Amino acid sequence: MTWIIIAIIAVIVIALIVMYNGLVRAGVRVDEAWSDITVQLKRRADLIPNLVNTVKGYAKHEKGVFEEVTKARSAVINATGVQETADAENMLTGALKSLFAVAEAYPDLKANENFKQLQDELVDTEDKIQAARRFYNGSVRDLNIKVKTVPYNIFAGMFGFKEREFFEVEEAEMVAIAKPTDVNFE
């Protein structure tokens, strides 16, 4: 009888350890995924001043657009937390659309090799941000499922594990920054 009680206690202890470690692993994955997002956001923020300066050389009278992009970039850099970062992302995406709309009005700028390279890098970075966002949201989903389901939810509360926020941006804003070039042979 004593061995049975010891075996039951051992199974319970092992189950607690497995659940705790699962929650820790899920939390670390979320933190790692958020770190990936911030790395890509910083990379994009570092590209934007070069892009703005390139466009400025061609469109000096578009001061309002440049100020909007600079303000939005600053908001992304200074954002803390998932929701504030998502809001700043929405603002920056809109500002970048305006910047590229200005660029459309200047054929010499669109043909500029430096501008093309910066635009390509920015599009590549946007793709990486979206991939990092999907990975982060998948990690958050996994953690949140554990935090909400039995028996993990009992131990999650005891050990202080909480649900995390998804990183969501407005779908209307999730448009590729660089649109395909129209080809017309007329």
Image (cartoon, helix red, strand yellow):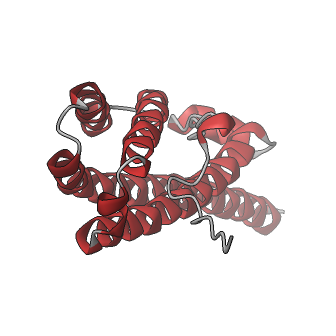
Depicted 1 relative to depicted 172: above or below: below
| The quarter of the displayed image where residue 115 is located | bottom left
Left or right of residue 23, residue 92 in this image: left
Q: Residue at x 46, y 63 (%)?
A: 123
Q: For this rendering, which residue is in front, 132 or 76? A: 76
Q: Quadrant of the N terminus?
A: bottom right
Q: Give coordinates of residue 130: x percent, y percent.
A: 55, 57
Depicted 53 relative to depicted 161: above or below: below
Left or right of residue 24, residue 53 in this image: left
| The quarter of the displayed image where residue 11 is located | bottom right
Q: Give coordinates of residue 163: x percent, y percent.
A: 61, 35
Q: For this rendering, which residue is in front, 74 or 3? A: 74
Task: Residue lying at the far front in this picture: please name it.
Answer: 186
Q: Give coordinates of residue 33: x percent, y percent.
A: 47, 58
Depicted 120 relative to depicted 27: above or below: below
Depicted 154 relative to depicted 176: above or below: above
Q: Give coordinates of residue 47: x percent, y percent.
A: 25, 58
- Determine if residue 77 is in view: yes
Left or right of residue 176, residue 43 in this image: left
Left or right of residue 114, residue 142 in this image: right
Q: For this rendering, which residue is in front, 17 or 110? A: 110
- Determine if residue 20 is in view: no
Q: Residue at x 57, y 58 (%)?
A: 179
Q: Quadrant of the C terminus?
A: bottom right
